[in-house]
Image (cartoon, helix red, strand yellow):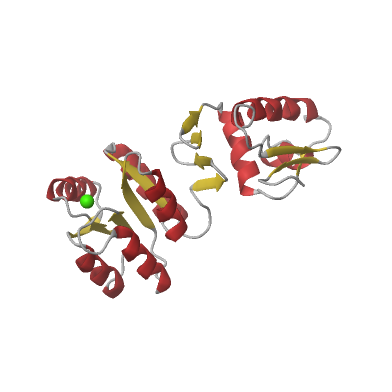
C-alpha cells in the first residue's frame, strides 16, 4: 500500500511519514503542491493525503486538477479546524474524506483503512443533506456547526435514510435493512416509529429547516424540499 503525502510543514510531514511506515505503509512525501501534483500524475498510489493549505498551488487546485484528469485515487484531505468551507469545498471537489488538524494518529489510520478497504466510489464515508452531515467513521453527526448525539441505532437509521435521501423509505425496508428482521411475524412498526420520532426530535426539531418527512401510510423520506 503506497501513500502519497502532500504536506509542506516538515514536522507534520515527518510525523505522518514515520507513523505510516511503522504501520507498514510505503510513503512518499511531497513538500510542495507542484511536486505533489507531478508525483500523483506520474506514479500510482493507493491513497493521497493532501494538505489544503500549501504555498503556491493550493490543495484544492491540485484536487480539482487530479479529478479533471480522471485520477480515481482516493484523496484524504487535511484541513484546519473551523475551516468548514474548505471541508465542504474539498468534498465537493472530489475528496473522499477529511481529517481536521490537529488530529489523533489513530483517527488518521482509521480513515486510511476505511478508504483503502472500501475503495472508491462504492460507499461514501461522509453523507450530507443540506446542513446535516454524518461521518460514518467517527459516527459524528452535525447540523451546521452543532454536533448532535445519537444512539447507535439512531445513527444507523439516519445513515440509511441519508443513503436513500430523496427516496421514500418504507417501514418494511427499515425493518429488513436496519433492524435485520425479515419475518413479518414480528411487526416492528412501533419500534420504528419511536426511533423516527426520537431522530426527528434530535435532528430536525431544534432547526428551522425540516428534513425528515413522514409520508402517511407509506413511510419516510429525507429531503430538503416538501413533497
Ligand atoms: Ca500546510
For the N terminus, which image quadrant? bottom left
Callout count = 0
The residue furthest front is: 208
Residue 29 image point, x, y percent? 19, 59
> Observer-nearest residue: 66 or 82?
82
Q: Residue at x 63, y 32 (%)?
A: 204
Find residue 67 and report its image quarter: bottom left
Q: Residue at x 70, y 47 (%)?
A: 225
Residue 127 image point, x, y percent? 53, 46
In the rendered structure, the answer to whether residue 171 lies left or right of residue 121 reads right
Q: Is residue 71 above or below residue 175?
A: below
From where the camera sits, is residue 1 visible?
A: no
Q: Is residue 199 above or below residue 164?
A: above
Residue 25 image point, x, y percent? 26, 54
Q: Residue at x 21, y 54 (%)?
A: 7
Q: Residue at x 70, y 30 (%)?
A: 196
> Observer-nearest residue: 149 or 182?
149
In the rendered structure, the answer to whether residue 134 lies left or right of residue 176 reads left
In the rendered structure, the answer to whether residue 169 lies left or right of residue 201 reads right
Residue 27 image point, x, y percent? 22, 57
Q: Is residue 91 above or below residue 161?
A: below
From where the camera sits, is residue 111 visible?
A: yes
In the rendered structure, the answer to whether residue 199 lies left or right of residue 97 reads right
Find residue 191 and report its image quarter: top right
> Observer-nearest residue: 43 or 63?
63
Amino acid at each position: 500500500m503506497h501513500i502519497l503525502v502532500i504536506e509542506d510543514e516538515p514536522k507534520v510531514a515527518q510525523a505522518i511519514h514515520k507513523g505510516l511506515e511503522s504501520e507498514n505503509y510505503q510513503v512518499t512525501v511531497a513538500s510542495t503542491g507542484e511536486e505533489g501534483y507531478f508525483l500523483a500524475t506520474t506514479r500510482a498510489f493507493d491513497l493521497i493525503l493532501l494538505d489544503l493549505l500549501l504555498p503556491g498551488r493550493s490543495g484544492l487546485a491540485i484536487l480539482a486538477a487530479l479529478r479533471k484528469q480522471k485520477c480515481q485515487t482516493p484523496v484524504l484531505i487535511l484541513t484546519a479546524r473551523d475551516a468548514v468551507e474548505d471541508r465542504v469545498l474539498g468534498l465537493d471537489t472530489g475528496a473522499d474524506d477529511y481529517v481536521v488538524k490537529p488530529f489523533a494518529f489513530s483517527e488518521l489510520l482509521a480513515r486510511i483503512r476505511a478508504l483503502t478497504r472500501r475503495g472508491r466510489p462504492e460507499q461514501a464515508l461522509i453523507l450530507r443533506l443540506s446542513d446535516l452531515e454524518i461521518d460514518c467513521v467517527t459516527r459524528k453527526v452535525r447540523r451546521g456547526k452543532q454536533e448532535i448525539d445519537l444512539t447507535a441505532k439512531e445513527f444507523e437509521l439516519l445513515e440509511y435514510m441519508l443513503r436513500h435521501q430523496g427516496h421514500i423509505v418504507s417501514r418494511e425496508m427499515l425493518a429488513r435493512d436496519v433492524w435485520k428482521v425479515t419475518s413479518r411475524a414480528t411487526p416492528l412498526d412501533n419500534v420504528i416509529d419511536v426511533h423516527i420520532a426520537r431522530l426527528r426530535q434530535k435532528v430536525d426539531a431544534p432547526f428551522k429547516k425540516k428534513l425528515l418527512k413522514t409520508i402517511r401510510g407509506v413511510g419516510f423520506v429525507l429531503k430538503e424540499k416538501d413533497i
